[in-house]
């Protein structure tokens, strides 16, 4: 699949992969901070942003899209920086094609499944199901404003900044009507795939690519004391925690986030 991307800067290529319900728009400010040092390729993944829609949406699909992008750009390898869904996509490519990855940064997500693994994981799956139901409850064909969408979504999503993040996926057409940038049907029908873990190579289940995991202190996506388990797959990895931040670490603590990224890449 030919993905939409924004490119800026010069130097070693660094590909940014957003999370579920996100897009390259969410990473523009971070990309601007990185472009003095790297050739930044800020991607919309399938079924998001300006990239094509497709009924298939697994981490294998996302990794294959990324591999196709590397080939399209003529890149032998690149640094991968992925948040949440994008982090799993980046991990999936790294374990299958480590020769295409120079280093890996994974933001607030672990490589294993969220389905039935523990109470917090079950809660995370339920939260996403609730969000999707809320988004689907918005009557986009008769919608007159984003404020109206926000009012409807507030019955499902109580946190205002999360609603504003989600509503960014509404696109206003020239005639004033609205459509979704997101492929909600594909995301809903593939939610089990998206909550699942990455697939490792059975003959070589571990990977020695230099890897940084960035965890939000207040987030439950990477359980506490996970370093040993992460090293079973990513043997050359480290984990750092950004204090007082949740799942959207890069948006909540951008200075601390950028410092962690640049320190890791310059070592």
Image (cartoon, rainbow, N blue to C red):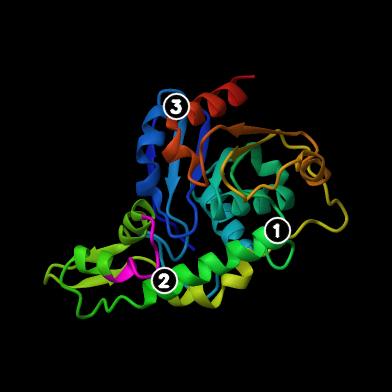
**Front one among 37 and 157:** 157
Q: Badge 1 is on which residue?
A: 198
Q: Is residue 246 left or right of residue 117?
A: left
Q: Badge 2 is on which residue?
A: 183
Most prominent secondary structure in the magenta stretch? loop
Q: Badge 3 is on which residue?
A: 255
Q: Is residue 92 above or below residue 230?
A: below
The reply to whether residue 58 is in sight is no
- The mark closer to the camera, 2 or 3, is 3
Find the magenta span and give its range: 152-159
How many badges with numbers are in the image?
3
Distance CA(mark 1)–CA(mark 3): 30 Å
Q: Is residue 249 left or right of residue 204?
A: left
**Front one among 198 and 77:** 198
Q: Please say if the residues under marks 1 and 3 sit with CB atoms less than 8 Å apart.
A: no
Question: In the image as oriented, which residue stretches furthest toward the right?
Answer: 203
């Amino acid at each position: 699949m030919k993905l939409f991307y924004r490119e800026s800067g010069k130097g070693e290529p660094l590909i940014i992969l957003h999370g579920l319900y996100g897009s390259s728009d969410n990473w523009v400010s971070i990309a601007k901070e990185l472009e003095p040092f790297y050739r930044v390729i800020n991607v919309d993944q399938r079924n998001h942003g300006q990239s094509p829609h497709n009924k298939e949406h697994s981490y294998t699909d996302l990794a294959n899209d990324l591999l196709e992008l590397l080939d399209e750009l003529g890149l032998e390898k690149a640094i991968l920086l992925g948040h949440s869904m994008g982090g799993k996509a980046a991990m999936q490519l790294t374990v299958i094609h480590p020769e295409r990855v120079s280093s890996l940064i994974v933001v607030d997500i672990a490589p294993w499944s969220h389905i039935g693994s523990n109470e917090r994981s079950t809660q995370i799956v339920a939260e996403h199901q609730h969000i999707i139901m809320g988004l689907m409850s918005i009557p986009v064909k008769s919608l007159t404003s984003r404020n109206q969408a926000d009012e409807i979504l507030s019955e499902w999503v109580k946190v205002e900044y999360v609603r504003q993040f989600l509503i960014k996926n509404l696109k206003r057409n020239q005639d004033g009507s609205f459509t979704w940038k997101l492929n909600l049907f594909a995301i809903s029908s593939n939610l089990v795939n998206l909550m699942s873990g990455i697939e490792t190579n059975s003959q070589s289940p571990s990977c020695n690519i230099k890897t940084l995991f960035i965890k939000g202190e207040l987030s439950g996506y990477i359980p506490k004391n996970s370093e040993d388990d992460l090293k079973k797959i990513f043997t050359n990895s480290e984990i750092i925690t950004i204090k007082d931040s949740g799942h959207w670490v890069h948006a909540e603590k951008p200075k601390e986030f950028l410092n962690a990224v640049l320190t890791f890449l310059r070592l």
